[in-house]
Image (spheres, rainbow, N blue to C red):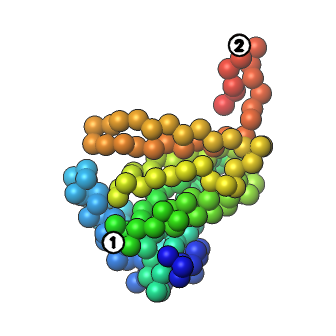
Amino acid sequence: MSDLQYLPISYLEENQLLPLMYEEEGAWMADLCWDYASVRQILSSFVRKKLLPGYAAVSQNEAIAYTYFLVNQTKGIIGAMYASKLRYSQEAVDELISLTVASLKDTPNIKRVEAQIMPFNNLSSQQPSCVTDSIFIHAISWKWIYGNIVRIRIQRPSRRSSHGHPHT
């Protein structure tokens, strides 16, 4: 998709993101029988107030994928990564993950980034190009009751204890 733009969510109006959020809500119900309406309402409220940190891939003035993140003391948490099944773009997924990880990596005091991204629409997340020697990424895929969950953990190298285990 050559017309893609990658924008901070705070640059978008709620109506640009709502169709995608409703689609995501439907995916949660269809795939996991989870009512995601209350989460969507909270996220939508934060979008309206320009308080949701994250990025969206926008095509023809409409969000086709988005991700948001939170910071909890020294931990960055990627809250979601959703791409439209109607206008799916692996390029958008890869770029949004890279932007998010880069933002969290550049946030002072962040020592770890975690995510549990639900793989709707055969979502694939690859190692972001922004990961450098000072940070490493470890991705683990495992089967869960309703499907695959991808967990990505990014952590700065830490001291090792006398037993050879990292201190966390």
Image quadrant where residue 11 sits: bottom right
- At mark 2, the secondary structure is loop
Name the residue at 73% across, 57% down: 106
- At mark 1, the secondary structure is loop
What numbered label is drawn on residue 34? Answer: none
Whether residue 45 is visible here, answered yes or no, is no
Number of disc labels: 2
Whether residue 160 is visible here, answered yes or no, is yes
Count residues near mark 1 (Cα–Cα under 10 Å), then give few for <14, some for 14-19, many for 20+: few
What amino acid is labelled 2 in the image?
A: His
Left or right position of 10 against 109: left
Q: Give x and y (percent) for residue 164.
A: 71, 17
Which is nearer the eye, 50 or 102? 102
Name the residue at 35% across, 58% down: 121
Q: Nearer the viewer, mark 2 or mark 1?
A: 1
Q: Give x and y (percent) for residue 135.
A: 72, 43
Left or right position of 2 against 165: left
Which is nearer the eye, 151 or 107? 151
Q: Give x and y (percent) for residue 101.
A: 63, 56
Count residues near mark 2 (Cα–Cα under 10 Å), then give few for <14, some for 14-19, many for 20+: few
Does residue 46 lie above or below 139 as drawn? below
Q: Quadrant of the C terminus?
A: top right
Name the residue at 30% across, 64% down: 25
Disc 1 target residue: 86
Image quadrant where residue 82 sits: bottom left
Left or right position of 124 against 126: left
What amino acid is labelled 1 in the image?
A: Leu
> For the view shown, which residue lies furthest in the front direction?
2
Disc 2 target residue: 163
Q: Give the CA distance from mark 2 to mark 1.
A: 51 Å
Choose the circle earlier in sequence order: 2 or 1: 1
